[in-house]
Amino acid sequence: MTLRLALAAVIVAACGLCGAALARAEERRWRMLQDTVSGLKRLRVQIVHLREPLARALKQSGAQLLAATAEHLDGAPCAAEAWRQTWSVAGSRGGAGDCLSAQDVQALERLFDRLGESGCADQDAAIRACAAELEEAAENARQRAMATNRLYTSLGLLLGLALAVLVV
């Protein structure tokens, strides 16, 4: 009987942890979007006001995905191609950006299609538009993360309790 109770406790704890892990996936998207939006704001200052070259501005943005794109910029013919190379790595399973949605990625693709290819005012408009879109996505992700955190953790614990009842 003691062994069954111990097994039941392990099942409840494991299911609760699985639920918490699922909830953290939503939080990870929110944090990645926040990082990218902050980086876009710094990128705008670097390009529009300081008139830094694109590679240096991307590196100094502080955002993980933007800095990774700067690494690919040397071997790429344009910023859009450097982004595609970055996304092929970052967007794969286990990559830095695998938590982003298709809409998030499309916003960044639209940005990189215009970066380094147009005038300062056009790049400013592209950065502002991308930042606004990603800020809205970040707020939605934050709200969803808060809701799913409680939901998934509770569901995990309840599933664990149901399985424990079956075992005992």
Image (cartoon, grey):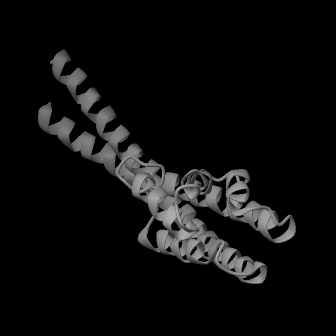
Near-viewer residue (126 or 113): 113
Q: Residue at x 52, y 61 (%)?
A: 76
Using the image as rendered, state which of residue 159 and residue 69 is in the foreground.
69
Given the current orientation, which residue lies at the most extreme top position?
2
Quadrant in the rendering for residue 99? bottom left
Residue visible at 57% across and 67% down?
79
The reply, left or right, for residue 32 in relation to residue 93 is right
115 or 125, which is in the foreground?
115
Q: Residue at x 46, y 53 (%)?
A: 149
Q: On the rendered structure, is 73 left or right of 116?
A: left
Which part of the image, by quadrant, shows the N terminus?
top left
| Residue 90: x %, y % from top left | 45, 53
Q: Give the number of marks.
A: 0
Give the image location of residue 36, x and y in percent.
62, 60
- In the rendered image, residue 89, in percent from the top left (x then y), is placed at 42, 52
Residue 168, compared with residue 42, is above or below; it is above
> What percent of the width, then of the height, locates residue 9?
28, 28
Q: Is residue 35 above or below residue 13?
A: below
What is the quadrant of the C terminus in the image?
top left
Residue farthest to the right, as pictured: 49
Q: Residue at x 45, y 59 (%)?
A: 85
